[in-house]
Image (cartoon, rainbow, N blue to C red):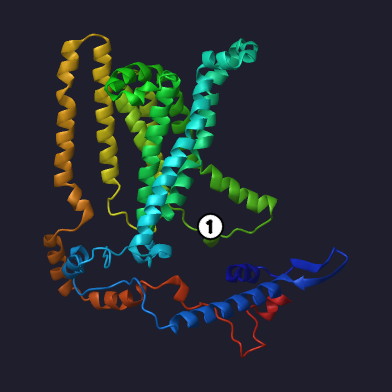
Amino acid sequence: MYEKIMDARRKRKAAHNRQEGCLRIFRRKVDSVVHIEKKLKDIAEFVKMEQSGILSAGEETRAAFVSFTSRYAAATACHMRLSVNPTHWITERAPEPHDVYWPFFSASFIKRWICRLAVIIGCALFTLIFLIPVFIVQGLTNLNQLEHWFPFLTIIFSIPYVSSVITGYLPNLIFQLFLKIVPHVMEFLTSIEGYISHSEIVKSACNKVIWFTVWNVFFATVFSGSAFYQVSIILDPTNIPSRLAVAVPAQASFFIAYVVTSGWTSIASELLRVIPLSITLARRFLFGEEILEEQVGVPTQPYHRDFPRVLFFGLLGITYFFLAPLILPFLLIYFCFAYIIFRNQFINVYGHDYETGGKFWPVVHNTMIFALLLMQAIAVGTFTLKKLSVASSLLFPLPIFTLLFNEYCRKRFLPTFKAYSAETLIKKDRQDRNDPAMSEFLDKLATAYQDPALMPIPFPPDPESLTSPLLSSEVRG
């Protein structure tokens, strides 16, 4: 409401009036600014009453932020079990003040556990439901199957241009339209999973989108296209390498078109920011809104939308580099343009609300390890089908070495992303003792973590004054 009033202050005259009445017959003109002022006063009074009720309740909160005089003491309290019952006292590192997600801040262990279980079930159901558009898309890439199920389409498919459009461009276009909703659905499901920080929500949503893309885009596409009738693949895991060796090369043309359709167009739209630009132009020219620079704000990087796409293209490159090398030039062009464009976006366009702390690097590592194991399994199956026993036997140690390398990285580097070392904390604490700015920092810390519901209203109405409006008399003119 206050932002609307500020917009009206910037205008010379309050020329936009609103009519109120019944059935458009008996109406009177009412100044819209006066109407907004009245709403703002009512909301402010309601918020004050609610805040006074919360503060006078005198009940202890279920959760709180606790600050310590040293980093070492905070880390000790965070990683130490504080009660006999592990579910009674739960401690975790506090996110940054702007990173706090308040809806689940006071949630109990049981509530968060139930929410997490419900989200897992919801993600599994969503993954299964999404198989329907995958089968539809793969049906378009295999015209023989469509002609078998729908014989009346044979005449349409006999036209050369129609068949090339249906098998080449149309499946990827339909697939991209369905994939647009996946990041938003995963973000919504993760937001009710029980996390208390926006960064953890984005990181968990990013993980979900990655594995959703791998299973529903790669495996479902591969096995529903070339192996559409081979349901026994899942029931017979020993034959998965040989089945992959047959099915994966058959879908090379689809994934090359997928890189062009999804990769190149996404990079172009990222540079132009087509959707925000279209919304701004529509608001300005169609609805006549005056959009100011401070209203637009600085956009943030949607990690859960762009991150999985880049990792999936890396998986396609590792998987197809020896099966269909033609995909490599398309991927090379994508990664070169992605580096240039995203570098510009990070420097000149996007801001950041919180620090991720490098927590996305383990996601990259796990995805690359999975891609290497998948490529090695496909290579073993390919050499087995071609009856190259020597080559297939030489490949068997590769998955073992890959898993050993992954285990070494988990032991050596993964703990760095989970907790700070005592050596680092003590060193920083000693530096803080001689830092004159620490007293100012501690003063700000007392009010940094404050629930938005208890924040004071920046522009409260004065109930005793009936003559001082929120807008000056010049604006009312």
| Tag 1 residue | 296
Q: Quadrant of residue 308?
A: top left
Compare residues 240 and 314 and report the one nearer the observer: 240
Horizontal relation, residue 359 to residue 310: left or right? left
The amino acid beneath tag 1 is: Val
Q: Residues within 10 Å of mark 1 (few under 14, many from 20)?
A: few
Residue 247 vs 347, above or below: the answer is above
Compare residues 156 and 381 and report the one nearer the observer: 381
Compare residues 244 and 320 and report the one nearer the observer: 244
Q: Where is residue 327 shown, x and y percent of the image?
A: 37, 22
Residue 378 vs 77, above or below: the answer is above
Q: Is residue 263 visible?
A: yes
Horizontal relation, residue 152 to residue 337: left or right? right
**SS at circle 1:** helix
Q: Residue furthest bottom?
A: 464
Q: Quadrant of residue 39?
A: bottom right
